[in-house]
Amino acid sequence: MILVVGGTGLLGGEICRLLSAKGKAIRALVRSTSDQSKVAQLESLNIEAALGDLKDRFSLEDACRGIDTLISTASATHARQDGDSIQTVDLEGQLNLIDAAKANRVGRFVLISFPETGNEFALQTAKRRVEEQLKVSGLNYTILQPTFFMEVWLSPALGFDAANAKAQIYGSGENKISWISYKDVAKFAVASLDNPEADDTVVELGGPQALSPLEVVKIFEERQGRDFVVQRVPEQALTAQKAAAGDPLTQSFAGLMLYYAKGNVIDMRETLRKFPVQLSSVDDYAQASL
C-alpha cells in the first residue's frame, strides 16, 4: 500500500489520481479539518483516508502501518491551519514522518522538495535538513526537486493574470526558468516507484524548455492576440522585503521570488532517458488557459 501525505493538495491530489488509475492500493493522510469535499473526492477513487497530522507523531505511526511506499508533498506554504508553520510542518513534521516510516520499515520514501536557490531562507533550510536526514535514515529514498510550477507561478495568485492580460515580473524578467507543470511532477513521483534509477537519488526537475518570464509573457500575448500590462518588482525590492520579513513564511516567499528573479535552467536530457515522461510546455499551458 502507498501512503500519500498531502493528498488533498494540488500535487498530492494529482499523484493520488494517477496511482488510482493504475489500480494501486492507496492511503491518504488527511486531517479532521481538511476540506471534506477533497476528502470525498479521494474516497471516490477508492483511496483510504487516514486521520493524522504531521505534528502528531503517534498518528503518523498509525498511518504508516502496512505501508510499502510513502510519498510526501505536504508543506505549510500550501494550506495553513492553527499550529502550522515551516518549523512545525516542513521541518519537524517531515522529520516525524521519516521516523514513523523507519519504525514501520517502509520500503521507499519519495520526498517532494525544490532545488538549491542560492539564497538562504527558512523554507529552504527546512527542506535541506529533511533531505539530509532522509539520506542517512537507511530508507530507500527518492528526492524530487522541481522548479517553479507554471500553474502556481503563472497564476493570478502570484500576479500573473492571463485573463486580464496583466503580469507581475520579479526581477529583470530576462533570466530563464525551466517551468514545470505540477502534473508532470506527479508523473515523475509515480514513475519513481518502480524504477531502480530512482533508488537513493536526488532528481532536479524542470520542463521541456527554459524561458525567461518576459518570453512567457510573449507566448501568452501571441496566444491571446493582445498585449499584456507588465509590472516589474525590482530585485532590490525583493531583497529588502526578505530582510524586513517579520516571520519565516514571509521571508521564504521573498526568498523564492529572488530565486525566480535569478532564474534556474535544468538540463532534463539524462533524467528523461531514465524516466520517459512526456513534458508539458508553457505554450501548452497558455493554450489551455484560453
Image (cartoon, rainbow, N blue to C red):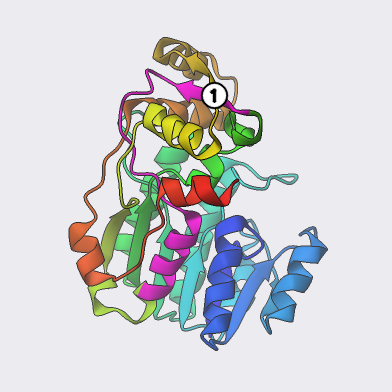
Q: Residue at x 46, y 28 (%)?
A: 257
Q: Which residues are magenta?
A: 165-191
What element does badge 1 sit on? loop
Q: Nearer the viewer, residue 280 or 77?
A: 280
Q: Residue at x 74, y 65 (%)?
A: 38
> Residue 147 location, x and y as percent?
38, 45
44 left or right, relative to 166: right
- Quadrant showing the C terminus: top right
User: Are there few (<14), some (14-19), or many (20+) residues within 10 Å of tag 1?
Assistant: some
Q: Position of residue 170 (x, y in %)?
A: 45, 22
Relative to 258, does residue 6 appear above or below in the rendering?
A: below
- For the question of whether residue 263 can be seen, the reply is yes
What residue is rendered at 48% in x and 19% in y?
A: 242
| Residue plotted at (55% across, 59% down) | 11
Which one is in front, 287 or 262?
Answer: 287
- Badge 1 is on which residue? 228
Instruction: Inspect the magenta stretch and tell me whether residue 128 lies in it.
Output: no
The residue type indicated by label 1 comes to Phe
> Left or right of 39: which side holds 72?
left
Against 218, residue 133 (above or below) is below
Q: Is residue 29 above or below residue 94?
A: below
Residue 32 appears anywhere in the view: no
Locate residue 74, reporting x and y percent: 56, 56
